[in-house]
Amino acid sequence: MSLVEVANLRKSFGDVRALDGISFTIESGEWIAIMGPSGSGKTTLINILGGLDTPTEGRAVVDSVDVGRLDEAALTRFRSEKIGFVFQQFHLVPYLTALENVMLAQYFHSTTDEAEAAEALRRVGLGERLAHLPSQLSGGEQQRVAVARALINHPKLILADEPTGNLDEANEETVIRLLRDLHSEGHTILMVTHDPSIGSLADRRIELAHGRLAQITVYSSEDEARFDHVLEELWLCAEIGRRAKLTRFHSLDADPERTIQRLAVLGLVTVQDSEVDLTDRGTRRARDVVRRRRLAERLFTDTFSIANAEADSQACKFEHIISPELDERICSFLGHPKTCPHGRPIPPGPCCTSAESSAKKSA
Ligand code: ADP
Ligand code: MG
């Protein structure tokens, strides 16, 4: 079962339809960016999922709890047990220290534990600021206190409504890095942001317009190309009978750890003792990428007589835009070649197998 299930969710304020029938699910461990223009319903959505508001119609289920069915007391318990909030305005209590602000969240949850609260602040890099009041902290530091507060009760879901909206660039970077770390440790994060470059860090982007779902984007084409390069590299390693170390990808990708981690989340690779292996699904995708690449190389050298180096670099761009249909047409056009111009095997496709069997029949 998904961690979050939103089904036909509606919320009206008088005759304003803040949410007008939206549905989606979120799996545990995902990082989702909610995007869309001002007034499109982002905050309303976050508030309902976090039990700060209730739906007019439809369902919002978080960790098997139907938020719309809870009374006031149950909502309070739901919030403190399941949700970690990070708001644009940090909402720290001004006369409490950083440490006390975190301990206050513990208090609402169960009992306070000063050592644990101090550890949470150390975790966000504020070990030296425990006794500071919010007014003695920078915006970024205040937001990091808020993140520590959000994490202290081990919530199932972190909800962040424009967490960097009030921060300068340097502080924004610190907070985003923190969220990235949390995501890579397995936390589920739902974050509202206006900034496309922050949105592109998420696994998926959910775009709202006028309270409706405008679009769900999984990965950008740059991401997909990055995935393909890593998968291709893994295929090449397997071809020469080697396992790939994580360090191998450092020259290949600007942020190899993140790319590999995303591939692992997608079930395309497994990582063990800093060695990376293709899963069965990963092997199939890698095989398709390698096939497209080598067919493109053949096409460029044989048909267009393009010199090797140039053919290589063109094939590299081409492999990302060849559809399965075009792949088969190129392959048939070339007469189902067995090797690339460098003599490496071209993994056969469905067209090769059927061409072979019909050749056998006629023989
Ligand atoms: P966003 O966060 O995307 O900017 P909101 O969810 O805050 O959008 O608001 C969506 C729409 O609902 C807006 O038209 C807003 O004016 C309206 N709205 C939000 N909260 C309330 C409220 N408490 N009372 C009346 N209207 C509201
Ligand atoms: Mg908002």
Image: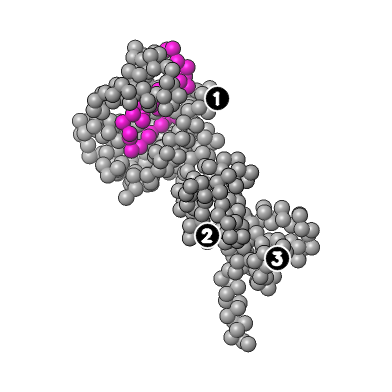
- Answer yes or no: is residue 171 visible: yes
Q: Residues within 10 Å of mark 2 (few under 14, many from 20)?
A: some
Does residue 330 appear in the picture of this structure?
Answer: no
Question: Does residue 61 sit above or below 160 in this rendering?
Answer: below
Q: Quadrant of the C terminus?
A: bottom right
> Magenta residues?
135-162
Q: CA distance from mark 2 to mark 3?
A: 21 Å
Asked whether 145 falls inside the magenta stretch, the response is: yes
Q: Is residue 100 above or below residue 2?
A: above
Residues at marks 1 and 3 touching, judged by CB atoms closer than 8 Å: no
Marks 2,3: beta carbons within 8 A = no
- Kind of residue at badge 3: Gly
- Residue designated by label 2: 283
Could you tell me which residue is drawn at 24 percent across and 32 percent down? Answer: 77
The x, y position of residue 59, in whole percent, is: 29, 44
Residue at screen point 26% across, 39% down? 68
The residue depicted at 61 percent of the width and 57 percent of the height is 236
Which residue is farthest bottom?
A: 363
Mark 2: amino acid: Thr
The residue that label 1 is drawn on is 169
Rendered view: 137 above or below 348: above
Q: Quadrant of residue 348?
A: bottom right
Residue flagged by tag 1: what amino acid is it?
Glu
Q: Is residue 304 left or right of residue 204?
A: right
Query: Where residue 280 sits: x, y (%)?
Result: 48, 60
Which x, y percent locates residue 234? Answer: 57, 54
Q: Nearer the viewer, residue 188 or 71?
A: 188
Distance from label 2 to label 1 (Cα)? Answer: 40 Å
